[in-house]
Image (tube, rainbow, N blue to C red):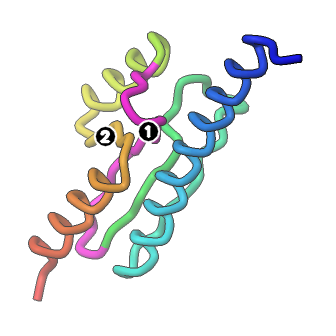
Amino acid sequence: MYHSSDYDNSLLLLKKQSEKVTERYLFDETKRIGGLPLKLIPQFFSGIPDRLCLFPGGRLFFIETKSEKDKPRKLQLLVHKQLRDLGFKVLVIDTKEKVKELIDEIERERPS
């Protein structure tokens, strides 16, 4: 017998896969252009973005990956603000297309 909770669980699984797909694409594309996509573990600092991506030319971004159209939680927004107030760039990326836009920008601005 079909239960609505089965449908809800399927949607949750799809959302999680979508975030994982985006994060994996970010990882692969960052490596492809010679960057380091460091995974940040929130064990001691809740709300920290998922990745610290270091790019050629000394560029770095804190990057929060989300499922498409998902928004950061309140604590994440607070941490993002703290990082921005310190002068760091923080991005929230929820699609492969946004990853591509970032990588294209990095490649355009890459020192020759």
Q: Which residue is depicted at the point 27% across and 67% down?
A: 58
| Residue at figure coordinates x 40%, y 69% from the top left | 30
Task: Locate residue 35: give its quadrant.
Answer: bottom left
Residue kind at label 1, given as amino acid type: Glu
Residue at coordinates 68% horizontally, 18% vertically from top-left?
Answer: 8
Instruction: Kindly identify which numbered label has been placed on residue 64.
Output: 1
Label placed on residue 86: none
Residue 58: in magenta span: yes
For the C terminus, the quadrant is bottom left
Left or right of 91 in this view: 40: right
Q: CA distance from mark 1 to mark 2?
A: 6 Å
Describe residue 11's horizontal placement relative to residue 104 as left or right.
Answer: right
| Residue 7 rendering spot, x and y as whole percentages | 69, 21
Which region is colored magenta?
56-72
| Vertical side of 65 occupied by 44: above or below | above
Residue behind mark 2: 91
Residue 61 in magenta? yes
Give the SS element for disc 1: strand
Give the total of numbered labels.
2
